[in-house]
Image: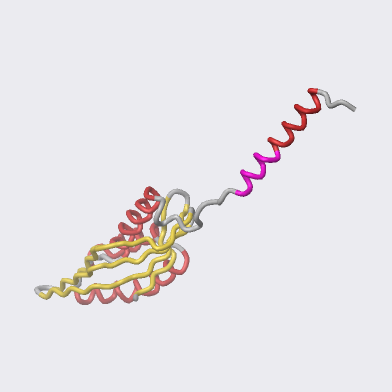
Amino acid sequence: MKPTIAGILGGVIILCGCAALWFSLSRSPGPANTALVDVAGTNAVTDQVGRALRTVFSYDPSQMDRTSVAAQEVLTGAAMQQYNTDFEAAKKHAAETKQVLTTAVRSIGVTDLDPDSARLLVFIDRQTVQGDKQESAAAQLLINAEKVGETWKISDIRFL
């Protein structure tokens, strides 16, 4: 039995198809944590979480309701529940003492990043002003964020 050109060509095509399938399946899917390699994603989560933290941790007694509404737009899950519980006490204290709180984000590092969640280490400075009295304090936060649509929202806040 003599092989025909069509048979040989068919065999070569099958071998090439099998090789292509094997190479595509054996490729590494890429890192699960893209915090160090996805510059655009890291910048987006850093920028949005930084702005959200300034919103959540800054207030003026004359604008507490506005602060609360803005916080609801940047928080989700456990962070929203925690904030709503703590904000009532802060609102009462600010009204009684006329204390203004300003928070500045000093540094943010993204430790884990995937398409719909991130974990960040954040260093903040908080300044309180009450009449003539000013006080400053620094804090470290561990933040979990979730991507909702195109927006990163804070889902958990832990003070370290």
Furthest residue in direction left, as rendered:
132
| Start-end of magenta stretch | 18-26
Residue 77, above or below 19: below
Closest to the observer: 33 or 66? 33
Q: Is 85 covered by the magenta stretch?
A: no
Residue at image point 79% right, 24% down: 6
Magenta stretch, main secondary structure class: helix
Residue at image point 39% right, 74% down: 85
Quarter of image, res 69: bottom left
Quarter of image, res 4: top right
Closest to the observer: 92 or 104? 104
Residue 123, above or below 146: below
Closest to the observer: 59 or 61? 59
Residue at image point 41% right, 72% down: 82
Q: Position of residue 143 (x, y in %)?
A: 39, 66
Residue 74, above or below 17: below
Q: Position of residue 41 (x, y in %)?
A: 40, 50
Furthest residue in direction right, as rendered:
1
Figure disc tally: 0
Furthest residue in direction front, as rendered:
2
Left/right placement of residue 9 relative to residue 100 reads right
Q: Position of residue 1 (x, y in %)?
A: 90, 28
Closest to the observer: 12 or 131? 12
Left/right placement of residue 155 relative to residue 98 reads right
Q: Position of residue 113 (x, y in %)?
A: 44, 58
